[in-house]
Image (cartoon, grey):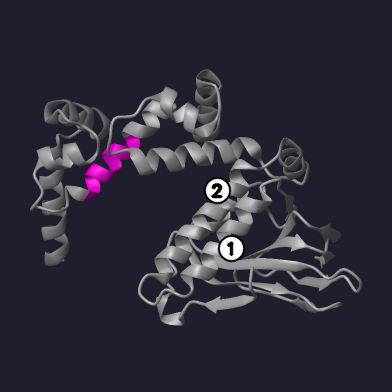
């Protein structure tokens, strides 16, 4: 892979993006080449194609080689250096986003456990090759680069080994909470369609009964009840829009039968959807007069 460096224009950054690639590149380092000690305000992952080097944080020094990688976390003092005799060749990608931390936790990567090893060296090399090719595309490079970033993170998530999970747990990462967070994320992404608890359990990677028990212990609600609460909460938001009918809102939150939706809404809120909408209008009118 040729050496390359690409940085996304600053005007394309949006703090509310799910994930945004900042910059990426590959380099065959000179002996002893180093960076830091310094801080970054975003995440950056280096992957080592060949050679070796050292990565140091305030907690630990790691000696790394081919097939390994390391994560730099925001606001964590970091230093890394190529070996003086066998300097590494590595690729890197820097990113940020509202769900960046969640994706990294699923890959068992944290500030306490920033190092990983993968057997999928060719696949990861291909991801960075695709980033290089995308950087040459004038019209769609941001979309192509982002797609390669998602693919890269998905490889790390799928490749997260049991030993890394145990290390992350030993370092204080709450694995049970991560399972619950993954379940909540799935619900809040898929509430508008029909879903089963079996499907939810399959997505999280847990047995159905265990997920239900774990979810309730952490949220106070069963997964089924959490789905209902979330759907009704979204419906309440949309009922503030007078241009949307109750039937349209019902369908939008996963109820194909408006009557069933109205029945569930009244059970949860004590008012029918129409009554709730009128109460919103009355509250708005009262606020404007005061």
Q: Is residue 5 left or right of residue 256?
A: right
Q: How crowded is mark 1: few (under 14 residues within 10 Å), some or many (20 or more)?
A: many
Q: Main secondary structure of the magenta part?
A: helix
**Mark 2–mark 1 distance (CA, rounded to whole Å):** 14 Å
Q: Residues within 10 Å of mark 2 (few under 14, many from 20)?
A: some
In this rendering, the answer to whether 262 lies above or below 97 is: above
Of 131 and 249, nearer the camera is: 131
Write the residue at 87% across / 68% down. Answer: 86
Q: Helix, strand, or loop for circle 1? A: helix
Q: Which residue position holds label 1?
A: 128
Q: Which residue is at the far top?
A: 209
- Whether residue 233 appears in magenta in the rendering, the answer is yes
- Whether residue 155 appears in magenta in the rendering, the answer is no
Q: Image quarter for residue 57?
A: bottom right
Give the total of numbered labels.
Answer: 2
Q: Image quarter for residue 264?
A: top left
Write the residue at 32% across / 38% down. Answer: 191
In this rendering, the answer to whether 160 lies above or below 227 is: below
Expressed as whole percent of the image width and height from the top left, the position of residue 192 reads 27, 39
Q: Is residue 151 left or right of residue 140?
A: right
Q: Helix, strand, or loop for circle 2? A: helix
Write the residue at 69% across / 45% down. Answer: 173
In this rendering, the answer to whether 179 lies above or below 208 is: below
**Which mark, residue 154?**
2
Write the residue at 73% across / 61% down. Answer: 49
Q: Quadrant of the N terminus?
A: bottom right
**Which mark, residue 249?**
none
């Amino acid at each position: 892979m040729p050496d390359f460096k690409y940085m996304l224009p600053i005007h394309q950054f949006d703090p509310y993006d799910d994930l945004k690639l900042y910059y990426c590149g590959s380099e065959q380092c000179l002996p002893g080449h180093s960076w830091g000690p310094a801080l970054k305000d975003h995440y950056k992952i280096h992957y080592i194609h060949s050679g070796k080097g050292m990565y140091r944080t305030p907690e630990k020094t790691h000696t790394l080689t081919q097939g390994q990688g390391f994560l730099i976390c925001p606001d964590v003092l970091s230093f890394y250096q190529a070996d003086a005799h066998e300097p590494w060749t590595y690729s890197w990608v820097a990113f940020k986003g509202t769900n960046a931390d969640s994706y990294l936790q699923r890959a068992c990567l944290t500030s306490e456990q920033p190092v990983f090893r993968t057997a999928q060296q060719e696949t990861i090399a291909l991801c960075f090759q695709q980033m290089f090719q995308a950087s040459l595309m004038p019209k769609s490079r941001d979309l192509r680069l982002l797609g390669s970033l998602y693919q890269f993170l998905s490889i790390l998530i799928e490749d997260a080994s049991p030993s890394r999970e145990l290390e992350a747990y030993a370092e204080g990462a709450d694995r049970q909470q991560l399972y619950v967070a993954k379940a909540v994320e799935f619900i809040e992404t898929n509430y508008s369609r029909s879903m089963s608890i079996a499907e939810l359990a399959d997505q999280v990677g847990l047995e159905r009964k265990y997920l239900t028990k774990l979810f309730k212990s952490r949220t106070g609600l069963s997964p089924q009840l959490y789905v209902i609460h979330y759907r009704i909460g979204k419906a309440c938001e949309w009922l503030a829009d007078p241009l949307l009918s109750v039937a349209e809102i019902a369908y939008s939150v996963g109820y194909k039968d408006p009557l069933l939706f109205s029945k569930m809404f009244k059970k949860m809120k004590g008012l029918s959807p129409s009554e709730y909408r009128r109460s919103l209008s009355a509250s708005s009118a009262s606020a404007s007069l005061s």
